[in-house]
Image (cartoon, grey):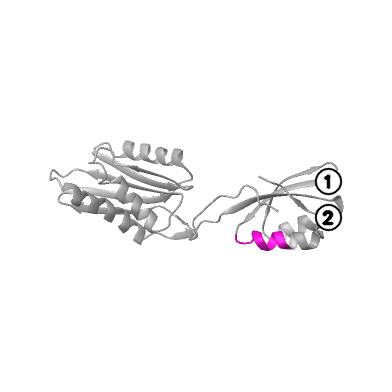
Amino acid sequence: MRLSCTASHPPDMPYAIATPVHSELLIRKSRFIGCVQSVPDRDAALAVVATLRAEHPGAVHVCWALMAGGQSAAVDDGEPGGTAGRPMLEVLRHHDLDGVLATVVRYFGGIKLGAGGLVRAYTDSVAQALLKADKVPVQRWLCLGCTLPYAQEGMVRRELEAAGAELNHVAHSSVVTVTFRVPDSTAPGLVQRLNDAGHGRLGWLLP
């Protein structure tokens, strides 16, 4: 038996941000406006950044970092390399966040902060916002598929509903083919119950 459509993920459950949260720091006359929020992907993150640029035409930098679906991005937006986006990304990683965008808008105050000062400023901007954030666990799903005799379709549907699974597709031919997705925390128990109730007549689809 093989589970299909499984995605690799770290052992620690990742978290998203329930609602956007902001911070604001004034460091040697430079103003740093931070925000962390949930986004589904890179395209959504780019749209948020574009909106910030339009809302803050006087800002000299709009730096950002993204963790989404196991992929990451870190953008310095003109700050010295590695002093903005990368430190912001490390804060997101430290908090086990996924599907989360961190942005920091900087208004330059006329005093240079140096590389170390910039790293601290961008790190603190994100960290201060996260202190106020309501973090919620990200539910990961497994996509599974199986074949079964017609007589067992009702049983399978009942087990899926009881497990909180979402039915994707049902096809009828010589056998019934069912595809569904289920929270990964309940998948092993569901598979075991289906195998037991099916008396070995369920066939699990390969990816």
Residue placed at 62% from the left, 47% from the top? 5
Crowdedness near tag 1: few (<14), some (14–19) or many (≥20) residues, C-alpha within 10 Å: few
Residue 100 placement (x, y as % from top left): 42, 50
- Secondary structure beneath dot 1 equals loop
Is 61 positioned to the left or the right of 204 in the image? left
Which amino acid is tagged 1? Val
Quadrant of the rendering where the C terminus is positioned = top right
Which amino acid is tagged 2? Gln
Q: Which residue is mark 2?
A: 152
Give the CA distance from mark 2 to mark 1: 10 Å
* Residue 54 colored in magenta in the image: no
Q: Which residues are magenta?
A: 185-192
Q: Tell me if I can see residue 34 in this picture.
A: no
Is 73 positioned to the left or the right of 155 in the image? left
Q: Tell me if I can see residue 32 in this picture.
A: yes
Residue placed at 68% from the left, 63% from the top? 189
Q: Main secondary structure of the magenta part?
A: helix
Which badge, 2 or 1, is on the more N-terminal residue? 2
What is the quadrant of residue 52 in the picture? top left
Residue placed at 31% from the left, 47% from the top? 86
Residue 84 placement (x, y as % from top left): 27, 46
Q: Which residue is mark 1?
A: 175
